[in-house]
Image (tube, rainbow, N blue to C red):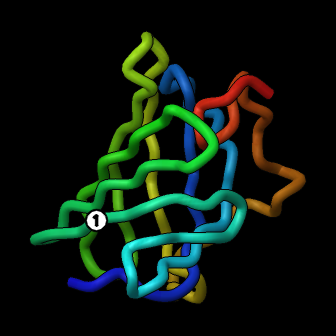
């Protein structure tokens, strides 16, 4: 599966169940933009993300228009994450104002 288009990432440092959000747009050259920039790699439904501006690395299992996974800074900060492709029918997304504030942003930098 080749990643493409606009997605919404949901992240929870410490796996508290309180999720922040970030926009992500996958480019065919292995980079992404949106709320943050970085690189991505996908093979056989496994998606890896690395950010240009922070230490966080994400790993997702992606099936069609959704993905679930985990992230780490590899210095003690870990959490849970999921992705939803924009426009996916049956997915109710939180308004940006309803997203919970996290101690660190999606890239793993303190907020």
Near mark 1 (Cα within 10 A), the count class, few <14, some 14-19 or many ≥20, is some
Position of residue 37 relative to residue 75, above or below, is: below
Give the residue at x 36% y 39%: 70
Frontmost residue, 70 versus 27:
27
- Residue 34 screen position, x and y as percent: 68, 69
- Residue 5 screen position, x and y as percent: 51, 87
- Residue at image mark 1: 41
Position of residue 84 relative to residue 64, above or below, is: above
**In the structure shown, which secondary structural element does the residue marked by tag 1 occupy?**
strand
Frontmost residue, 59 versus 80:
59
Give the residue at x 46% y 71%: 31
Q: Quadrant of the N terminus?
A: bottom left
- Residue 83 screen position, x and y as percent: 47, 62
- Residue 61 screen position, x and y as percent: 24, 58
Give the residue at x 20% y 61%: 46
Where is residue 62, by image quadrant?
Answer: bottom left
Position of residue 77 relative to residue 81, above or below, is: above
Q: Quadrant of the C terminus?
A: top right
Position of residue 61 relative to residue 30, above or below, is: above
Mark count = 1
Give the residue at x 69% y 44%: 20
Where is residue 64, by image quadrant?
Answer: bottom left
Residue 103 lies left or right of residue 13; in this view the side is right
Residue 32 lies left or right of residue 72; in this view the side is right
Q: Furthest-left residue in view?
A: 44
């Amino acid at each position: 599966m080749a990643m493409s288009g606009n997605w919404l990432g949901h992240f929870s440092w410490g796996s508290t169940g309180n999720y922040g959000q970030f926009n992500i747009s996958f480019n065919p050259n292995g980079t992404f933009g949106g709320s943050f920039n970085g690189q991505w790699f996908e093979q056989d439904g496994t998606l890896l993300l690395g950010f240009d501006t922070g230490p966080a690395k994400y790993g997702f299992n992606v099936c069609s228009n959704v993905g679930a996974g985990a992230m780490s800074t590899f210095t003690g900060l870990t959490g849970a994450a999921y992705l939803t492709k924009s426009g996916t029918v049956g997915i109710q997304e939180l308004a940006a104002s309803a997203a919970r504030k996290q101690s660190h942003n999606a890239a793993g930098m303190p907020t």
